[in-house]
């Protein structure tokens, strides 16, 4: 069975109104239009035209897959088409999608959700400026509150104007405690204080917000390692998770960002935000392929419930499957 | 491979072409292929890249290039010039009306830096141009966006205007009334981030525009944006009629290829660039610098021109001869160092060399300091000592140390460097024998060898 029919089959038995399928399908509507519709329109009669690979190159690059990975995907695809004597566009495109997402599909039953082995579990959230760290934190907090976990937030972005207020406002809306320090105080001290409080109050999850920083600023990157160290002094093994927030509209610099952050403080997963725009989020492939950083969550809309655990099958269903 | 700086790629292309006297169809194709890769890695739009590469090809395949002695420099120049043309050859500045306040509206996707940039422009208007400015908070959606703007307004001593979560169109209208009635010079509207496909929010911007008729509608674009940046710009431009773009976060290592795509496909000029987190980190846009950045080549063209102008080729040849014959003295070394110094500070030179952008400020300072030390020390020597450094024994060194205010350790460093430079003469002879051109290896900048 081809990939597309497999996905269609897999989700046809599930209740169509299931929250996750709907969110994925809705959030990826624009990406689908810009990717799947384009690869399906390469020929009108389901034949593979001679300019197929040129067209693919254009579509993949315009999806921010990056020239290096695009070339690799196309070379592998050409081999598959030759070896399997593929003759129709539909089958070729199916092979293309399998090739693109093979790094994600080779592992079965991956749990991308946070596992709560210890209390408190600490999640450190990092990223460059403007990717949506604070909003993602609110969405994650909301998610675990709904699972009846107790959640505390730490406002370790003491630099940006209004950052502390922003997190506090989320704290008010979600009715959870936000540990803060003074503006321009040492972020590590806020993190330490929060770790201590989280331990005392035995909360299940402490989420630490950090200031946006460009990966080229050495001092700020060192500050992240310090925050991480200071937390582990209070809670051994913490932070248990460090999520890098990546904006889906980011181009090739996203890989450089991921690499630099991973070197400064071990990244355990990425959260791709703003996938509901017209960007195709090709960066999701490159960070997995080049750095083996898995995407753990994906932001598919503006409401609190639109941040979903990353699920490759749901993702591909939303991106590729015709209803 | 995705991590390799473009710079490395570009340097290797140039290196490959160096030593080839003429451009052939074959090496030309390889060069263009590499340029294409460089541009795509910089996130320049696929279609723009295609057109660009064709343009360069057309210009380069002409006779004049084939006849040039150094084709790699010629290609560099063509690529660079073409990029500058595409980016807009003239700097476009904001024009201020004389009889009423100017109204500037900032728009863009979420997280592109609208609020911070609103603060930066205000600072620029208040402090540089002494314009009394109102900052109006029209972002009623993002939590604490109003607080953020208020804090920024306080930092730059501007008047802060907010009506809380009132309709943004009303806020803009009231802010405009205040600006006109109280004779302010400028009004800046900070709007909420939005997706260009969000009809309701795009309509809100259209309504603000209709209500207050801004003089400038500026789109914020993140330097790290990918291929989709062009669709964002096209839609914002179509709905609002943009007067310009501001590229933010250029202090990172993102190449900002989107600037090229936007300028080329929408004809909207880039007016400012954001180069840091502080409120004075806003620069006017320079097509030249942007072109260099997109190519990742440092200011290589400027370097080539500078080197040609400044270094007296004859004197250089004479020194080379001297070094070859083994009569290279400390005077010659100092002279060489001064030649290099005339090109500008070491750090500005290092910045211009492709493949070197990662040098830290600390390293740069060290190299510069070392050069200064060398000069002071050599100047404290007698003529004889400079001609025959081998006579420098302890007592002389102590005298020189006293005279120059340095230690004998510093003096030994100078002598060591001198020995190293003499040592390269051997290598240079081989180099010359093999028909090498350009700067001999002995001409490394002192302090960086």
Image: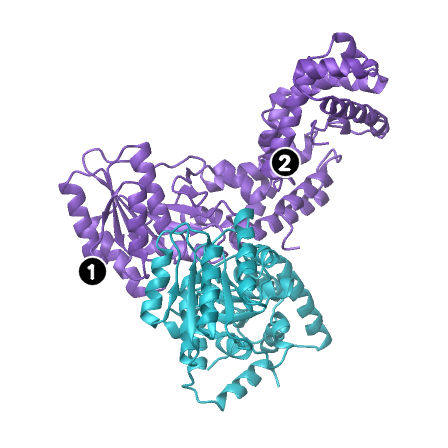
Chain colours: A cyan, B purple
Residue occupying the far bottom of the picture: A13
Percent of width and height locating residue A93 = 59, 74
Q: Indicate the chain on which mark 2 is placed.
A: B
Whether the residues at callouts 2 and 1 have beta carbons within 8 Å, the answer is no
Percent of width and height locating residue B141 = 30, 62
In the depicted structure, whether residue B12 falls above or below residue B234: above
**Of callouts 2 and 1, the N-terminal one:** 1
Q: Residue B53, labelled with which disc?
A: none
Q: Indicate the chain on which mark 1 is placed.
A: B
A70 relative position to B130: left or right: right
> How many discs mark residues in the rendered view?
2
Residue occupying the far front of the picture: A200
B207 or B72: nearer the eye?
B207
- Residue named by callout 2: B363
B124 or B238: nearer the eye?
B124
In the depicted structure, whether residue A69 falls above or below residue B358: below
In the depicted structure, whether residue A107 falls above or below residue B239: below
- Residue named by callout 1: B166
Label 2 crowd (10 A; few <14 / some 14-19 / many >=20): few
């Amino acid at each position: 069975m081809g990939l597309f029919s497999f996905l269609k089959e897999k989700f046809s038995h599930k209740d169509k109104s299931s929250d996750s399928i709907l969110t994925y399908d809705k959030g990826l509507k624009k990406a689908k239009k810009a990717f799947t519709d384009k690869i399906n329109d390469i020929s009108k009669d389901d034949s593979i035209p001679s300019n197929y690979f040129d067209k693919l190159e254009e579509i993949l690059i315009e999806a921010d897959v990056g020239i290096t990975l695009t070339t690799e995907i196309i070379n592998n695809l050409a081999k598959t088409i030759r070896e399997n004597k593929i003759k129709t566009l539909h089958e070729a495109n199916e092979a293309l999608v399998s090739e693109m997402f093979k790094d994600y599909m080779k592992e079965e039953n991956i749990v991308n959700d946070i596992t709560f082995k210890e209390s408190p579990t600490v999640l450190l959230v990092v990223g460059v400026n403007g990717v949506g760290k604070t909003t993602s934190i609110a969405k994650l907090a909301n998610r675990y509150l709904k699972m009846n976990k107790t959640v505390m937030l730490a406002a370790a972005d003491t630099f940006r104007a209004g950052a502390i207020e922003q997190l506090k406002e989320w704290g008010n809306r979600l009715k959870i405690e936000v540990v803060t320090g003074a503006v321009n105080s040492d972020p590590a001290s806020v993190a330490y204080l929060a770790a201590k409080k989280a331990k005392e109050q035995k909360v299940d999850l402490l989420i630490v917000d950090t200031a946006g920083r460009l990966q080229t600023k050495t001092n700020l990157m060192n500050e992240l390692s310090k925050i991480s160290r200071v937390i582990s002094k209070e809670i051994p093994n913490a932070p248990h998770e460090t999520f890098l927030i990546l904006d889906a509209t980011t181009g090739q610099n996203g890989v450089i960002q991921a690499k630099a952050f991973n070197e400064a403080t071990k990244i355990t997963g990425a959260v791709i935000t703003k996938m509901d725009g017209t960007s195709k989020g090709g960066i999701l492939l490159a960070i997995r392929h080049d750095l083996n950083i898995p995407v753990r969550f994906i932001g598919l809309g503006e409401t609190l419930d639109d941040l979903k655990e990353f699920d490759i099958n749901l993702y591909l269903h939303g991106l590729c499957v015709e209803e | 491979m995705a991590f390799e700086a473009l710079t490395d790629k570009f340097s290797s292309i140039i290196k490959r072409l160096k030593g080839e006297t003429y451009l052939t169809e074959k090496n030309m194709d390889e060069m263009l292929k590499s340029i294409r890769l460089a541009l795509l890695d910089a996130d320049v739009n696929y279609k723009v890249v295609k057109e660009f590469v064709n343009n360069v090809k057309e210009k380069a395949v002409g006779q004049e290039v084939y006849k040039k002695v150094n084709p790699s420099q010629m290609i560099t120049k063509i690529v660079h010039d073409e990029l500058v043309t595409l980016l807009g050859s003239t700097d476009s500045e904001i024009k201020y009306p004389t009889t009423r306040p100017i109204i500037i509206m900032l728009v863009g996707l979420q997280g592109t830096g609208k609020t911070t940039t609103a603060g930066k422009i205000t600072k620029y208007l208040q402090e540089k141009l002494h314009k009394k400015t109102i900052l109006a908070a029209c972002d009623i959606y993002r939590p604490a966006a109003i607080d953020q703007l208020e804090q920024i307004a306080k930092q730059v001593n501007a008047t802060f205007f907010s009506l809380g979560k009132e309709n943004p169109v009303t806020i803009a209208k009231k802010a405009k009334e205040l600006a006109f009635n109280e004779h302010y010079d400028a009004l800046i509207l900070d709007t909420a981030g939005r997706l260009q496909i969000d009809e309701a929010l795009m309509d809100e911007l259209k309504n603000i525009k209709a209500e207050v008729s801004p003089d400038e509608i500026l789109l914020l674009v993140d330097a790290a944006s990918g291929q989709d940046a062009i669709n964002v710009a096209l839609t914002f431009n179509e709905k609002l009629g943009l007067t310009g773009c501001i590229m933010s976060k250029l202090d990172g290592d993102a190449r900002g290829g989107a600037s090229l795509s936007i300028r080329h496909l929408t004809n909207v000029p880039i007016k400012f660039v954001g180069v840091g987190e502080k409120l004075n980190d806003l620069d006017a846009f320079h097509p030249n610098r942007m072109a260099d950045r997109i190519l990742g080549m440092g200011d290589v063209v400027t370097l080539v021109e500078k080197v040609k102008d400044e270094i007296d080729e004859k004197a250089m040849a004479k020194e080379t001869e001297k070094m070859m014959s083994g009569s290279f003295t400390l005077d010659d070394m100092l002279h060489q160092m001064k030649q290099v110094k005339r090109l500008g500070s070491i750090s500005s030179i290092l910045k211009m060399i492709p493949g070197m952008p990662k040098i830290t400020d600390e390293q740069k300072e060290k190299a510069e300091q070392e050069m200064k030390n060398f000069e002071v020390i050599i100047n404290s020597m007698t003529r004889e000592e400079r001609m025959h450094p081998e006579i420098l024994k302890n007592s002389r060194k102590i005298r020189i140390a006293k005279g120059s205010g340095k230690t004998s350790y510093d003096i030994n460093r100078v002598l060591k460097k001198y020995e190293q430079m003499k040592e390269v003469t051997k290598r240079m002879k081989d180099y010359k024998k093999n028909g090498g051109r350009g700067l001999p290896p002995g001409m490394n900048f002192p302090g960086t060898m």
